């Protein structure tokens, strides 16, 4: 019973490089989310998706893009990484029409040099 | 907009002490309230929740009561253990469910033997 799986778990990038973080869930959830966690800031919502083919901006969307081509996958892209994007990224999904609890992945620790 | 305020940490207690972590919120409508726990190196796990006023959520000896009159959802435990050491997040979820959770900044709890 995998739940929410994030890959990779760790990554170091140089400024200006691009990369994609993958989130996969096997619970048939409609809603999926990407958050970033920074010291003293809690978790902040980057982008979210309410279904396959749909995405929307959250609180801190600048510098990120997302895609939801398949219901089970939610990709987060950094086109040109910046040191300010050094953070721990968490993916989450929710079922029950949005009324259930969010299920979180174990996070991706990303460092931008 | 929505916001969650929780007490600053770290909070350091001795084993078997009584725990209270304060949480207050601002939200439109009637939000659902949650406490999540994050152990080192892991993602967030749902600890307990309450979906309407006067509901009490409970799990693993932790409790929190949804107080609409004081807009609060304080986390309590009668006797903490070293294994309770973690970061605790208060969060709320309002509206139709699509736009994610609003988190507090987290409270780091340290239990000493």
Image (spheres, rainbow, N blue to C red):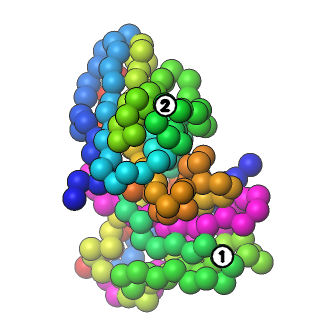
Residue receiving disc 1: B52
Q: Which mark is residue A100?
A: none
- Label 2 marks a residue whose chain is A
- Front residue of this view, candidates B7 and B13: B7
Image side of residue A2 versus residue A76, left or right = left
Residue B23 shown in magenta: yes
Q: Residue at x 56, y 29 (%)?
A: A61
Q: Position of residue B111 (x, y in %)?
A: 33, 73
Disc 1 is placed on an element classified as loop
- Whether residue A15 is visible here, answered yes or no, is no
Q: Is A90 drawn above or below residue B68 in the view shown?
A: above
In the picture provided, is B113 more to the left or to the right than A49?
Answer: left
The residue under label 2 is A53
Q: Check the residue under mark 1 and report the chain it is in.
A: B
* Magenta stretch: includes residue B9: no
* Residue A110 sits in quarter: top left
Residue A13 x %, y %: 29, 20
Q: Please rate how many residues cluster around mark 2, counting C-alpha atoms within 10 Å: few if below 14, some from 14 to 19, many from 20.
A: few
Mark toward the viewer: 1 or 2: 2
Q: Are marks 1 and 2 on the same chain?
A: no
Seen at 48% across and 24% down, the residue is A64
Instruction: Magenta stretch: give its range.
Output: B15-41
Residue A101 at x, y percent in the picture:
47, 62
Q: Residue at x 38, y 10 (%)?
A: A16
């Amino acid at each position: 019973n995998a739940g929410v799986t994030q890959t990779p778990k760790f990554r170091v990038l140089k400024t200006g490089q691009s990369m994609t973080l993958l989130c996969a869930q096997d619970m048939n959830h409609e809603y999926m989310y990407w958050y970033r966690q920074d010291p003293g800031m809690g978790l902040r919502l980057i982008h979210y998706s309410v279904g396959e083919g749909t995405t929307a901006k959250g609180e801190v969307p600048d510098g990120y893009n997302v895609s939801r081509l398949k219901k089970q996958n939610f990709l987060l892209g950094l086109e040109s990484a910046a040191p300010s994007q050094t953070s721990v990224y968490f993916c989450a999904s929710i079922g029950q029409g949005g009324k259930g609890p969010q299920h979180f992945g174990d996070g991706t620790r990303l460092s931008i040099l | 907009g929505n916001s969650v305020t929780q007490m600053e940490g770290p909070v350091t207690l001795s084993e078997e002490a009584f725990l209270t972590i304060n949480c207050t919120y601002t939200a439109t409508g009637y939000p659902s309230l949650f406490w999540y726990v994050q152990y080192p190196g892991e993602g967030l796990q749902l600890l307990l929740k309450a979906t309407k006023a006067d509901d009490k959520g409970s799990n693993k000896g932790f409790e929190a009561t949804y107080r609409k009159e004081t807009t609060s959802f304080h986390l309590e435990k009668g006797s903490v253990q070293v294994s309770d050491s973690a970061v605790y997040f208060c969060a709320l979820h309002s509206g139709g469910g699509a736009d994610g959770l609003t988190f507090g900044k987290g409270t780091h709890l340290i239990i000493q033997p």
